[in-house]
Amino acid sequence: MIKKAGTEDALTLAELAVLLWDDNDLHELEEEFRELAQDEEAACFIKYADGRPAAFAQCQLRHDYVEGTDSSPVGYLEGIFVLEAYRKQGYAAELLEACEQWAKEKGCREFASDCELENAESLAFHKAMGFKEANRIICFTKKLGDS
């Protein structure tokens, strides 16, 4: 079963998300998901298996330019995660489908995502789900001193 998450699901989402984004704080993620649940331009979905949360996906609308697209808004997969015990069972594909359907209902003609260059598992997932690689970039930052 897949459920579109509401504010009552914020902790459940955070508990899954902290496994994906382990440099984040559980309580900060919980608050972020509580806010996202009230945002008309965002959606989170939870996949349940064996009566427990097994996976989640977060998507949003992006109005700014999205690499490789030519429309706006674009549905964007912000994150997707499946507990290890439930992988290779099609749960991520089901969650992606829920995100894509949500984006279509919001008027999107395109859907996009990204992953880190070294994340071979994510790259393989995206290609298997029909995504086409749009570009590869390396991002740079530089601290600016007080002037």
Image (cartoon, grey):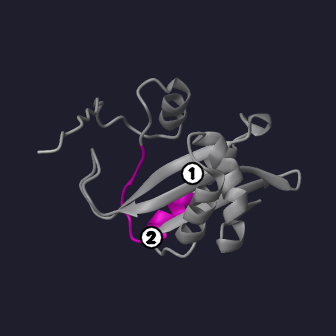
Q: Residue at x 28, y 63 (%)?
A: 72
Q: Residue at x 88, y 50 (%)?
A: 50
Q: Nearer the viewer, residue 62 or 147?
A: 147
Q: Is residue 118 magenta?
A: no
Q: Quadrant of residue 5?
A: bottom right
Left or right, 110 with respect to 87, comes to: left
| Residue identified by numbered label 1 | 96
Q: Residue furthest right?
A: 50
- In the structure shown, which secondary structural element does the residue marked by tag 2 occupy? loop
Question: What segment carries the magenta color?
Answer: 99-113
**Quarter placement of the C terminus:** top left
Q: Nearer the viewer, residue 28 or 136?
A: 28
Image x and y of residue 109, in percent: 36, 61
Image x and y of residue 135, in percent: 28, 34
Q: Does the rendering let one see residue 92? A: no
Image x and y of residue 26, in percent: 65, 52
Q: Residue at x 52, y 29 (%)?
A: 124
| Residue identified by numbered label 2 | 41
| Residue 78 against residue 126 in the figure, above or below | below
Q: Nearer the viewer, residue 71 or 58?
A: 58
Amino acid type assigned to the residue bearing label 1 in the image: Leu
